[in-house]
Image (cartoon, grey):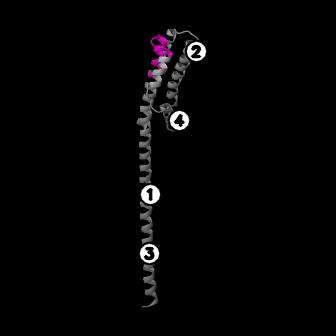
Amino acid sequence: MDKAQIYTALGSVVITAVVTLLAVYVANRGNMNRMLLQFKHEKSTRRSEQLRQKLEEVYVLTEKFVTQLSIHWMLYMQVMDGGLTYNQALDIGNDRKVDAPVYDRLEMLVDLYFPELHESFAEIIQHRDAANKILAEHKRNYKAGDFDGNCYVKPMRDILLGVDTAVKRFKESVVLQERKL
C-alpha cells in the first residue's frame, strides 16, 4: 500500500468521523431543543393548574369568609332589634364553631398570586370595615345603657346588600382570571 492510498483511507476515515460527529451533534441539539420545549410546556401547564387550584380556593374561601361575617353581623343585628341581649349574643358567638382564620388565607392568596383581584376584594373589606364601625358604635351605646339599637339595623342591612353585590363582582373577577389561564 502506497502513501496515497494510506492518505486516501485516512482522509475518508477522518471525513466519516467528522460527518458522524456533526450528525450526532445536530441530532442531540434537536433533541435538546425538543426537550426544552417540552419542559417549558410542562412547566407552563403545571403553573396554570396550580393557579387554577388557588383560584378555586379563593372562590371557596370567599364564600366561607362572607358567611362567617354575615352570621356574626346577623347575630348582633338581633341585639340591635332587641331580640337578644349582648351577653346572649356573645355566648352564641363563643359556642359557634368557626373555621380556621379564612380571611388570612384569602388575603394572602390575593396578595401573592392575584393582585388583579385586589380592587374587587378591597370592596368587600370596605363593607366589612363599615359594618364593624356600626357594630362598635352600637356596642359603645349599649354599654352606656342605650339598649335600643333599631337605628343601626337599616345601615347594617344596607351593608349586607352591599357585601352581596361586592362578593358577586369579586367572584366574577375570579372566574375571569380562571378563564385567562
Residue matched to label 4 = 111
Q: Earlier in the sequence, mark 1 or mark 2?
A: 1
Q: Residues within 10 Å of mark 4 (few under 14, many from 20)?
A: few
Magenta stretch secondary structure, dominant: helix
Q: Residues within 10 Å of mark 2 (few under 14, many from 20)?
A: few
Q: Earlier in the sequence, mark 4 or mark 1?
A: 1
Q: Earlier in the sequence, mark 4 or mark 3?
A: 3
Q: Label 4 sits on what residue type?
A: Asp
Q: Label 3 sits on what residue type?
A: Ala
Magenta residue span:
71-86
Residue matched to label 2 = 140
Considering depth in this image, is 40 or 13 the residue closer to the camera?
40
Q: Secondary structure at mark 1?
A: helix
Q: Residues within 10 Å of mark 3 (few under 14, many from 20)?
A: few
Q: Label 1 sits on what residue type?
A: Asn
The residue shown at (47%, 21%) is 91
Q: Secondary structure at mark 3?
A: helix
Q: Earlier in the sequence, mark 3 or mark 2?
A: 3
Considering depth in this image, is 99 or 41 the residue closer to the camera?
99
Q: Circles 4 and 3: CB distance less than 8 Å?
A: no
Q: Tell us which disc is closer to us: 4 or 1.
A: 4
Q: Label 2 sits on what residue type?
A: Arg
Q: Secondary structure at mark 2?
A: helix
Question: For residue 54, which quarter of the picture?
Answer: top left
Q: Which mark is residue 17?
A: 3
Q: Circles 1 and 2: CB distance less than 8 Å?
A: no
Q: Tell us which disc is closer to us: 4 or 3.
A: 4
